[in-house]
Structures are given as structure tokens and as C-alpha cells.
Image (tube, grey):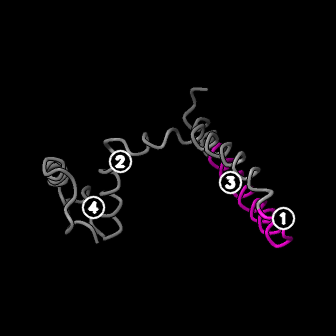
Amino acid sequence: MNDPYERARKRVDEKKGFYKHLTVFVLINLFFNLSSLLSGNGFSSWSMTFFWGIGIVFHYINVFGPLNSRFDEDWEEREIERELNKMGYSSKDGDISRKDIDHRLKKRSNEGGYKKSDLV
């Protein structure tokens, strides 16, 4: 399968399958756990939730990859670009230069991360 469209379609189908699985997990477990608590059986269905939850985690990893790979070195740059776009700026349009973004990222990493003033 070398066709980019087919690969993209397969990825979308995998993601859709995961979100359906997650929705069914939440709805079924909400029903069983609430009915279990309301009937006075205590926590009799929590083991199902726990083991099914493990299955959900493995399904997530299969579709999206390990969590730490989602925060690779380009992640911060993509997120900054996304936030700039939300604010109406774009490095592509010259509002902010890519060189300026790279400089700020390097400066922040050399300073040892975020400062309190960076957090809102």
C-alpha cells in the first residue's frame, strides 16, 4: 500500500475505530458502575473497567504510538505555530519569522524550561 491517500484513509479509520471503542468503553462502564453502586453491590464491576481500560491503553498505543512520542522535539514548534494561527499571526505570512521562533525556543531551552511568568 504505497498510495498516500489509502495510507491516510487507513490511519483515519484506525483513529475512528479507537474513538468508537473509547465511547463504548465510557458508556458501558458508566452504566455498569452506576447501576452497581445504586443497587448496593459496591464496586463489583470495577475489575471489568480496569481490565478493559488496559485494553483501551493498548489500543491507543497501537493507533497513536507511545505517549512520549507525541511530544517529540517538533511538537513544541507545531503547537506554537498553532497558537500563533489562533491569534491571527503566521510565520508563513511574515508576521513572525521562523528564525525568531527558533531563537525563542533555543533561548527557553537554555534557560532551563519555563518561568512562572510563562504560565498563565
Q: Is residue 109 above or below residue 44?
A: above
Q: Position of residue 111 (x, y in %)?
A: 13, 51
Q: Which residue is mark 4?
A: 90
Q: Position of residue 44 (x, y in %)?
A: 80, 57
Of the residues shown, which amino acid type is indicated by label 4?
A: Ser
Q: Is residue 26 found inside the magenta-colored segment of the image?
A: yes
Which element type, helix, strand or loop, lies under badge 1?
loop
First of labels 1, 4 by sequence position = 1
Q: Residue at x 27, y 66 (%)?
A: 89
- Between the C-alphas of marks 4 and 2, the distance is 17 Å
Q: Which residue is mark 2?
A: 75
First of labels 2, 3 by sequence position = 3
First of labels 4, 2 by sequence position = 2
Span of residues in magenta: 14-42
Badge nearest the viewer, 1 or 2 = 1
Q: Locate the C terminus by quadrant.
A: bottom left
Q: Which residue is mark 1?
A: 41
Q: As drawn, is 23 to the left or to the right of 91?
A: right
Q: Residues within 10 Å of mark 3 (few under 14, many from 20)?
A: some
